[in-house]
Image (cartoon, helix red, strand yellow):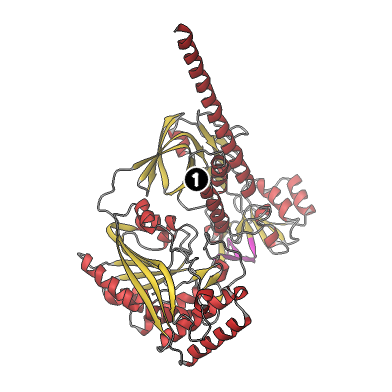
Amino acid sequence: MQEFILQTGIVGSVSLMTREHTPDTHHLPHELWHSLPGGFADYLDAGAQLGAPIRDSVLDQLTDAHDTAPATIVDLGSGVGADAVALAKRYPEARVHAIDVSAELLEHVASRATAEGVTDRIKQHLTDLDSDWPAAIPQGVDLAWASLSLHHIADPAAVLQRAFDALCPGGKLVLTEFSGHESFTPNDLGTGRTGIRDRVAPAPGRPGADTDWAQLLSDAGFAPADSSEHALVAHGTTPAGAQFLAARLSTLRDLHSHDLTDDDLSALDAVIADLTAGTSQISFIDGRKVWIATRPETQPPAKVIEADAVVLGGGAAGLAASVALGRSRRRVVVIDDGKPRNAPADGAHNVLGNEGIAPGELLARGRAEAESYGVQILHGRATGVSGTIDDFTVDVAGSTHRVHARRIILATGLVDDLPAIPGIAQGWGQSVLHCPFCHGWEVQGERIGIISSDEVAIHQALLFAQLSDRVTVFLHEAATPTEEQREQLAALNVEVVASRVNRLLMDGSQVRAIELDGGRTVALDAVVVAPRFHARTALYEALGGIAEETPFGMQIPSDPRGMTPVPGVWAAGNSAQPMAMVVASAASGVTAGAGVHGDMAFADLGRAVQERRGESIVAQRR
């Protein structure tokens, strides 16, 4: 069973990073998992051995509850693969999909599967649980298994919602998380120092132990879950127990070293040395709680949430709008399907104070900020809207809720309509770019190819030529440049290639070359294209709005405040401003949120004045 013991930036047996975390934000950044500390996988393996009795007990209970054996299983956060292999062996006809964000840990999964003879039935997927992981696995999952993997996720409610959506009706989710407090015996850890156990392992701070997982399961749509309490026990007299305890005490020593005296630290070092030598008698017990939840065979009637404003879209614009409204004490619901447009990018740029931040990390922080002001975030996709100002209803796919609101903010973003050239979609957001301000610095000095579609290519050539003296324009299917354009390109020392582009030659998401008609290739490091930017206008049109066509694509018309021609409906971010970068989108969200609050405030004031006048007239008549 995968063992994650995470407290204030410490995972497992070792200090993994110096990145700040608060007690309420346990999300681990991607870069942490790219190079795991030495011994971490061994620590997970020791924990898996100690947790085997819990896993076997749960599997027995699960087998009794299943009418038929599951055929498709997903292991959410597979660690070293102990659970994935156990599931494959318990259900010999099943296909197990092991998901983890660490390539190194997935190698352990593969090795364990080979050693146990189940390699043909376990498929590894390198992906983050905070991302759209269901897209990587087949539809109709029968069993989802999440063992100590959700307490460090940025948005566990969203992961549970994705699990619900991925499961077939009647499918099961097994969730295991920390429960209660860990305890060492004896109290002095064999050091003779009274109270050292309490100084090393204080009770507060267990990750996820205070989370109401039962409520989160219910909110995701699961039927009331069966739960059971278990205990993980480790004895220093066993190899796995000694390895686990040595790692655990090393972690706690590092975590609380500032609260320990030199004598305490020396005593702990001696305990760890005894554990490593196999001569320690200490023991450890830690609580685990397991929920077995079922996706109902039929979807229950949707629950209606009453809100002042509903924000459709949880990107930078939508979250910024929700924060502005939440800080004004408005009841706000954000509906988001967790598929941001900039997800492929390694970093978001020109974000003042957060330059280069990973898009997922930026949104995780934004969600936490919004929720701190009472904003409710629903994972799902708005599939239908109806009504008029002060009386809108939004239907949400993948959720047990619908939202009734006075105002709507459309922050649904846009779809990039990319040129139909093989390789472009594969490298989009990585080495296939469109904006010199978003990603130009990262390709400065490199070999940059601009695939022309119209005169926008001249504009792109002008800007990218400021970043590199190795820029080439490929006309592809565009018209021959005018004499003036040729003169401009020549002045920039930009080469023009008239041939049609057949495809990009890729190494994963990295462009290596362009292949032209006739087979000629031109080596490149980055490719620039000019997509069409089409805002998602369907919901706006369902409310009677008419989308606006621009030279760059379709958009939702709005005034500078974000107000659209449809009363009570506002737009923010790329829905109304296709060229807006992250900060501009967030700014438009703040403006829209403030505008919506003011609009409702004036409407309320008008009603209050009318009521007061009515009361005054009645009083006079009396």
Image position, residue 443 (x, y; %): 68, 62
Looking at the image, residue 486 lies above or below residue 90: above
**Would you identify the image quadrant in which residue 250 lies?**
bottom right
Is 548 in front, or is 123?
Answer: 123
Q: Which residue is mark 1?
A: 375
Image position, residue 493 (x, y; %): 77, 57
Q: Main secondary structure of the magenta part?
A: strand
Image position, residue 567 (x, y; %): 50, 28
- Indicate the amino acid at tag 1: Val
Residue found at the very far top of the displayed protein: 621
Which quarter of the rendering shows the N terminus? Answer: bottom left
Image position, residue 563 (x, y; %): 56, 32
Looking at the image, residue 362 lies above or below residue 401: below
Give the number of marks: 1
Residue found at the very far right of the displayed protein: 491
214 to the left or right of 194: left
Could you tell me which secondary element the residue under label 1 belongs to? loop
Q: Residue at point 47% right, 76% down?
A: 105
Residue 552 seen by the camera: no
Residue 290 seen by the camera: yes
Q: Residue at point 48% right, 42% down?
A: 312
Is 488 in front, or is 391?
Answer: 391
Looking at the image, residue 620 lies above or below residue 188: above
497 to the left or right of 332: right
Which quarter of the rendering shows the C terminus? Answer: top left
Q: Which residues are magenta?
A: 509-526
Looking at the image, residue 599 lies above or below residue 523: above
Q: Residue at point 60% right, 71% down?
A: 17
Magenta span contains residue 521: yes
Magenta span contains residue 31: no
Is 438 in front, or is 501?
Answer: 438
